[in-house]
Image (cartoon, rainbow, N blue to C red):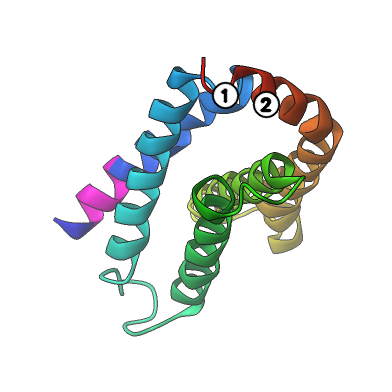
């Protein structure tokens, strides 16, 4: 049952990635953000109930802790860090990396789908590519997205 819940909320969080294509700071942005955050929290909590790979605490559990910290830092800025001049950019960066981590975690599931592919190729495609593409998009768009978000906040 934990695996089913984990899979459902992970899928919801992945779908909430549509938020990166929509204007920031709007009501729709907030509601999709709440959906993403709640889905991620449930996903991370349920990840600690999954032990089918190692039989105990493993590397993915450690990465869940990193993911939780990334999400908490991302949420700090709109909730408590609005006095900082660049709080919106910081929120965008950390939330972007929260999503990149989710995509990379989803990519981990493809390792078993393509067992005949070399490990290096699976690592490049399912981890490296999302990280590089995500980082590029985050840093290329952060200033413009933050500027528009500040204009939309409160509307």
Where residue 138 sits, quadrant-wise, is top right
Q: Magenta residues, as a range?
A: 3-8
Magenta segment's dominant SS is: helix
Q: Is residue 113 above or below residue 58?
A: above
Q: Is residue 54 visible?
A: yes
| Residue 26 falls left or right of residue 20 | left
Mark identifier at residue 150: 2
Q: Which residue lies furthest to the left in this view?
A: 1
Q: Please provide percent x and percent y for residue 131.
A: 73, 49
Name the residue nearer the viewer: 121 or 97: 97
Q: Is residue 72 above or below residue 135?
A: below
Q: Name the residue under label 1.
A: 153
> CA gap, disc 1 to disc 2?
5 Å
Q: Please provide percent x and percent y for residue 11.
A: 38, 37
Q: Please provide percent x and percent y for residue 125.
A: 71, 46
Point out the image quarter for the N terminus.
bottom left
x 39%, y 80%: residue: 54
Mark identifier at residue 24: none
Q: Do the residues labelled 1 and 2 touch (CB within 8 Å)?
A: yes
């Amino acid at each position: 049952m934990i695996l089913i819940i984990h899979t459902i909320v992970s899928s919801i969080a992945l779908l909430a990635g549509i938020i990166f294509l929509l204007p920031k700071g709007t009501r729709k942005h907030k509601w999709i953000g709440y959906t993403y955050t709640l889905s991620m929290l449930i996903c991370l909590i349920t990840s600690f109930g999954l032990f089918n790979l190692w039989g105990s605490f493993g590397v993915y559990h450690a990465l869940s802790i990193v993911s939780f910290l990334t999400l908490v830092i991302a949420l700090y800025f709109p909730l408590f860090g609005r006095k900082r001049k660049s709080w919106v950019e910081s929120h965008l960066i950390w939330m972007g990396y929260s999503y990149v981590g989710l995509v990379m975690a989803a990519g981990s599931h493809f390792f078993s789908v393509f067992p005949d592919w070399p490990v290096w190729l699976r690592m490049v495609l399912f981890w490296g590519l999302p990280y590089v593409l995500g980082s590029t998009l985050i840093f290329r768009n952060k200033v413009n997205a933050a500027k528009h978000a500040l204009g939309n906040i409160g509307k």
